[in-house]
Amino acid sequence: MDLSPERSNLEVFSETLLSLAARDRDILAVTSDSRGSGKLTRFGRELPLQIIETGIAEQNLVGVSAGMAAMGKKVFAVSPSSFLTARALEQIKNDVAYSNLPVRLVGISAGVAYGLYGATHHATHDLAALLAIPNLDVVLPFDNSETRWAVQAAVNYNRPLYIRFGRKAMPDIRTPESSFTIGKAIRLKEGRRACVIACGETVLPALLASDLLGKEGISCGVVSMHTLCPFDFAALSKIARTTGAIVTCEEHSVHGGLGAICASYLMEHRLHLPFKSIALPDQPIQSGCQEQLYDYYGLSPENIRDQVAALLSPVD
């Protein structure tokens, strides 16, 4: 498996959206002064009648997007995740989810991708906030392939949807024959001793950690849980019944995200096995580039390897 970085998922998102929109005039991009950061400059240049700029006004962004969706347009509302899911939370709840309008909310530079800008730009709350809103699906593509497929699936997806992207270059590891379905996890690597379940950009260090464990004789599977709502509980149940330990990894608060969903399900269904959630702690997050913060908060391949090995070690 080639894990060499290719391009950022945002670049693939914009390229795929442009290709689709060129053949479908109902596809619109709506941005809140985020044309550049959302990689939509070319989109605006080639399809000027299919892009709307609201300025730095995230509430208006969502309201306008909901109105256009009500008129039958296929709207992608693009804005930095930290602002989209905080400033416009009420509009997401009422104008999109409650009104059952199929707006594709695209949160860019999520997690700690804007790390050097500090806490004001961290988006470590977005999953918890949005997962608490009924009738809103949540997707976090891992690599370039998942991004491409997620955008293609989103165009005709008839439900409110949040798609979350980071900024760093990611690999493109699967063939065109691979399948992608919103709500269905993808097993990237088999392993019987343990399994790492990750979402978004944390899938990459999970795969690298699995390679490190393999060199130590530990068979560790990796699953891309690219959809948090609707969640693939069938996949989680199968993992719990066929492996010795589970570690979850996410670029999000320890509260209300992937780890919390998995822990709750496992406990409620009496699936008792060693379990560890690797996420950002309940404290103010540090500033720094994404790689530095991954190392600091234990999302590095080396720490994931250590956490898996610790779960498998006999208790004294």
Image: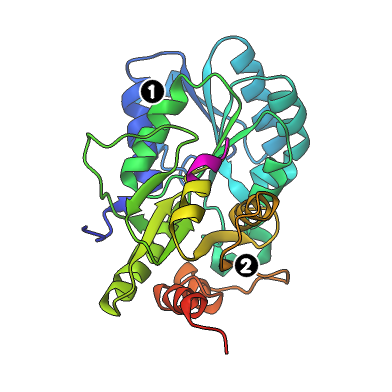
279 over 66 or under it: above or below: below
Residue drawn 68% across and 55% down? 267
Identify the residue position indicated by label 1 in the image.
47
Is the residue marked by circle 1 packed among few (<14), some (14-19), or many (20+) residues within 10 Å?
some
Identify the residue position indicated by label 2 in the image.
280
Q: Where is residue 300 in the image (x, y as percent from the top left)?
A: 44, 73
Furthest toward the bottom, the residue is: 316
Inter-mark Cα distance, 2 to 1:
39 Å
Q: How is the image coloured?
A: rainbow
Magenta residues, start to end: 230-235
Q: Where is residue 17 in the image (x, y as percent from the top left)?
A: 38, 30
Tell me if 142 is positioned left or right of 4 in this view: right
User: Where is residue 176, by image quadrant?
Assistant: top left
**Is residue 168 shown to the viewer in this render?**
no
Amino acid type indicated by mark 1: Leu
Amino acid type indicated by mark 2: Leu
5 over 74 or under it: above or below: below
| Disc nearest the viewer among 2 and 1 | 2
